[in-house]
Amino acid sequence: MATPLALIVAITMAEVLTPSEVHLSPLLVAAPAITASYAGPRLTAVVGSITVIDQVLIGLHFHALGTDVIQGQLAALVVVSAFLVSFSFIRDRNRQQLVQVRLVSKATQQALLPPLPAGLGPLRLACMYLAAEQEAHIGGDLYAAVHAPSGSRILIGDVRGKGLPAISDAALLLGAFREAARRRAILLDVVTHLDESVRADLEERDWESPEAWESFITAVVLEIPDDKPVVHVINCGHPPPLLIRDHHVTALQVSQPAPPLGLGELCEPAYHVETFDFRAGETLLLYTDGIARARCPSGVFYPLAERVTTCPGEDPDALVTHVHDDLLAHVGGHLGDDAAMVAIHRLPD
């Protein structure tokens, strides 16, 4: 209240002390205008009422309350104050709606994409998710991890498409993976089940819509046995995982990649499991192309393989935090696409 009240007092004193031909009282409208910029409708109405009363007192002081000039100033002050109160009310209502939407968005993310467990058997995990849309918390990137009798099964994927359909596809794939990863004994059966689930959902789409033809999901599915220093990989059109070993990075390129999930009608997929060494003390980094294709303002892609080697230590949380901060610094603070990452560190036996 200090600023608008001080302004009212200053303008009133100036109006009284200056010659009568100089009219400063129209400046009183600045007081409710300043108040509306930060205060709610009630406080704005109070300050507006004070300015109207002050304008009346100024008119009485100069014995000019009945003149057209003072009455016109009073009418303008009342109208402007009313508009400012309405503006403040609408702004506060929209702010409350935005807060509610943010809470719902956070709750939806926790339900759809909860944080990965910190540990699965001999593995330590850390994850990161960055939505490209401001104020958004979820999008088309996804990850999940399940501990099954055969070991830990981990998924990372990227839905092609935008908006709510992409979120719907992500939710469908996550649900299918969590069910299949626990029930299916063979990794091939898990990925086959995922493709069948995505295809069944796509068959129910309106294929006259252009968005329907863009709907498919790239994914990498891993199986890491608890008792063997290996990792089994099926890659469905996704960027290859990175293996970090003694600060050297190797991309786990499969020799027979499968098409993205959901494209089985166009090309009958043949899934192949490929096995790589994954020993104690090593780290696997899974990521989506929102990281690999992130560009700086000059157009240079983010050099992920180079930057991960500069991370001190082997802690997966430290690695994720390092890439997160370095990525945002590279792109200037804002990504052009959703980005997700999962770091998996194998502990010593």
Image (cartoon, grey):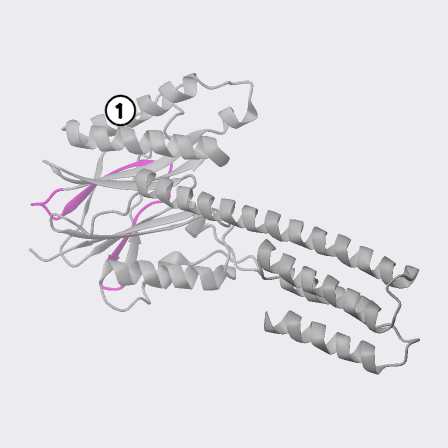
Q: Quadrant of residue 190?
A: top left
Task: Report the residue at 74% width, 62% height from top.
Answer: 52
Q: Which residue is mark 1?
A: 193
Identify which amino acid the numbered label 1 is placed on. His
Around disc 1, counting alpha carbons within 10 Å, would you say few (fewer than 14), some (14 to 19), or many (20 or more)? some
User: Residue 260: x percent and y percent?
Assistant: 38, 31
User: Residue 161: x percent and y percent?
Assistant: 48, 34
Task: Report the residue at 12% width, 48% height from top.
Answer: 229
Task: Report the residue at 36% width, 25% height from top.
Answer: 198
- Tell me: 79 left or right of 98: right
- Tell me: 174 left or right of 13: left
- Tell me: 91 left or right of 29: left
Q: Quadrant of residue 30?
A: bottom right
Report the number of discs.
1
Residue farthest bottom in this picture: 17
Quarter the N terminus occupies: bottom right
Q: Is residue 131 above or below residue 63?
A: above
User: Residue 42: x percent and y percent?
Assistant: 58, 56
Q: Secondary structure at mark 1?
A: helix
Quarter the C terminus occupies: bottom left
Residue 276 in sight in this render: yes
36, 276: nearer the viewer: 36
Residue 269 in sight in this render: no
Magenta residues (range): 225-247
Q: Is residue 173 magenta?
A: no
122, 300: nearer the viewer: 122
Q: Quadrant of residue 149?
A: top left
User: Residue 105: x percent and y percent?
Assistant: 41, 43
Q: Is residue 232 magenta?
A: yes
Q: Is residue 226 above or below residue 348?
A: above
